Image: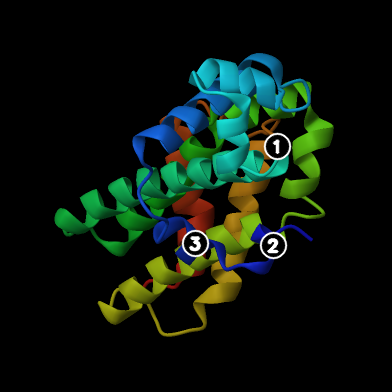
Amino acid sequence: MTKLAKLKLLPLVRDAAPEDRNQATVLDAALLAFLDFGIKRTSMVEVARRGGLSLATLYRRFAGKTDLIQAVGLRQAREFIVQVDTVVQGQIDSEAGAEEQIVELFVAFQEGLRGNQLLDRLLTTEPEMVLPYLTVRGAPVIELGRDYLAEFIERLQREGKLEQYDPKPLAEMIARTALSMALTPQTVIPLDDDAAVRRFARDHVVPGFRIP
């Protein structure tokens, strides 16, 4: 079991200390190398070269390649949460109704997952590396989506826009649906059509939230 599997991911992602310039440089270099070569073919030597630092310095920051991969993964998760937060905050500021907020949240989840360059690259060229962490060993990823969505539901309940119920089962179902649609894009739902995705969310996702 990895270190991340033992931790609650949402607080870990949200409460992470800001990156300093050196850390950002290393993670930028690692991400570009992963995009160019994939994870298996990327060496610590290549990351050090791209980051403009010595191999010894890189190993002082990251004990090994696994730690570096996890750091890049956490950063990707953080960027995903920030992207979705931006959508949610925009809906709150406009005092949108529950239905509109739910639809836009679902769309943001879809766009964030399907628009991730690293995820797309790995699913295409190294599925054996990433798929276990999104399927049979994907509990931390599901947990991240579930906890985020549960917070969203609880806020709408406090505002009187949703009925009172345990939000976690519904939140997990939505998280699993969004992940499945990202991993298996072959579907009768035209995911590249924004209007169609919104219709799907309005017809099939919104009813489960029990809007009064």
Distance from disc 1 to disc 3, alpha carbons, whole Å, reads 20 Å
Residue at x 72% of width, y 27% of height: 39
Binning the other alpha carbons within 10 Å of mark 2 as few (below 14), some (14 to 19) or many (20 upward) gives: few
Across and down, in percent, residue 190 comes to 57, 29
Q: Which numbered disc, 1 or 2, marks the residue that appears first in the sequence? A: 2
Q: Are marks 1 and 2 in contact (CB under 8 Å)?
A: no
Image-based side of 103 in relation to 183, left or right: left
Whether 161 is drawn above or below 58: the answer is: below
**Residue that mark 2 sits on:** 5
Image-based side of 157 in relation to 92, left or right: right
Q: Which numbered disc, 1 or 3, marks the residue that appears first in the sequence? A: 3
Question: Tag 3, which secondary structure?
Answer: helix
Q: Amino acid at mark 1?
A: Lys
Q: Are marks 3 and 2 in contact (CB under 8 Å)?
A: no
Image quadrant holding the C terminus, namely bottom left
Asked whether residue 212 is in view, the answer is: no
Which label lies toward us, 1 or 2?
A: 1
Q: Which quadrant holds residue 161?
A: bottom left
Across and down, in percent, residue 191 comes to 55, 31
Across and down, in percent, residue 65 comes to 70, 37
Image quadrant holding the N terminus, namely bottom right
Residue that sits furthest to the left in the current view = 94
Residue at x 80% of width, y 46% of height: 132
**Residue that mark 1 sits on:** 65
